């Protein structure tokens, strides 16, 4: 976790301190490819919240994403930023008291679509908007009730120099990416809802623009 966090810090400082006259979001419509790594953490909420069930031991694990991006320049300052990529997110079941003891690593594969409104100045850009993740496949230990569609918000801070762009990003799910059901009585169910928070970095290249 520390390696990716340090990488994000370095990338953020580089993005904020490196301003060149040749750096800018392309005018019109531009397309490209990008890939990167992410680190996913999980918060678990209960439904109903006042129940005694407390599920723990779901830890942090790494994933990646690779795919395409497109920007549509609206004016000097504003643009639309769009992504369509394959996304791998992971978590791990570990002993709550001894995190070095890992029982299983779970992988979730998505087709991810994001669309954000962004602002830009001399190559630096920031964007924020919704993200939809369609579940393609999963490899998990034990039973899983992963929804077919998960949605949330995604924010990015980046820098583009000529054809190369670098980004740091933060994603937060607003719907659960997994749900576990506890059947206490025939008429009473308790749910543990898994909510995702991911940070990461990516690097891309612009292929062409109109």
Image: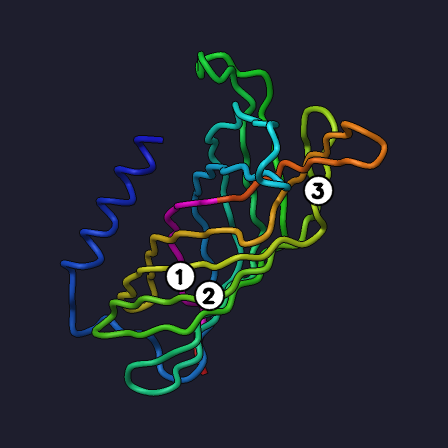
Viewer-side label of 3, 2 = 3
Q: What's the magenta bit mostly, secondary-structure-wise?
A: strand
Q: Which mark is residue 32?
A: 2
Secondary structure state at the residue bearing disc 3: strand
State yes or no: residue 190 in magenta: no
Q: Which mark is residue 137?
A: 3
User: Distance from label 3 to label 1 (Cα)?
Assistant: 28 Å
Q: Position of residue 113 (x, y in %)?
A: 57, 62
Q: Is residue 7 above or below residue 15?
A: above
Secondary structure state at the residue bearing disc 2: strand
18 to the left or right of 85: left
**Displayed quadrant of residue 103:** top right
Report the number of discs. 3
User: Distance from label 1 to label 2 (Cα)?
Assistant: 5 Å
Q: Earlier in the sequence, mark 1 or mark 2?
A: 2
Q: Which residue is mark 1?
A: 205
- Is the N terminus in the top left, top right, bottom left or bottom right quadrant? top left
Report the front residue among 27 and 62: 62
Question: Which residue sits furthest bottom?
Answer: 75
Report the front residue among 210 and 197: 197
Disc 3 residue crowd, few under 14, some 14–19, many 20+, Cα 10 Å: some
Q: Position of residue 78 (x, y in %)?
A: 34, 80
Disc 1 and disc 2 in contact, CB within 8 angstroms? yes
Q: Earlier in the sequence, mark 3 or mark 2?
A: 2
Which residue lies at the image location 51% right of the left edge and 44% below the top edge?
A: 196
Residues shaded magenta: 197-208
User: Distance from label 3 to label 2 (Cα)?
Assistant: 26 Å
Secondary structure state at the residue bearing disc 1: strand
């Amino acid at each position: 976790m520390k390696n990716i966090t340090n990488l994000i810090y370095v990338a953020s400082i580089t993005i904020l301190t490196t301003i060149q006259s040749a750096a800018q979001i392309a005018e019109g419509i531009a397309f490209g490819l990008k890939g990167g790594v992410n680190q996913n953490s999980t918060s678990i909420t209960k439904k109903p919240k006042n129940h005694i069930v407390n599920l723990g031991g779901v830890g942090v694990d790494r994933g990646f994403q690779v795919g395409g991006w497109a920007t549509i320049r609206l004016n000097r300052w504003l643009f639309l930023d769009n992504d369509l990529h394959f996304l791998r997110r992971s978590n791990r079941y570990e002993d709550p008291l001894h995190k070095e003891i890992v029982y299983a690593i779970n992988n979730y594969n998505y087709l991810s679509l994001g669309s954000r409104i962004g602002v830009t100045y001399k190559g630096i850009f920031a964007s924020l908007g919704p993200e939809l993740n369609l579940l393609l496949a999963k490899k998990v230990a034990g039973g899983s009730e992963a929804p077919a569609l998960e949605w949330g918000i995604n924010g990015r801070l980046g820098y583009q120099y000529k054809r190369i762009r670098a980004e740091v990003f933060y994603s937060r799910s607003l719907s659960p990416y997994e749900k576990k059901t506890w059947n206490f009585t025939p008429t009473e169910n308790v749910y543990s809802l898994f909510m995702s928070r991911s940070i990461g970095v990516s690097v891309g290249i612009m292929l062409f623009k109109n």
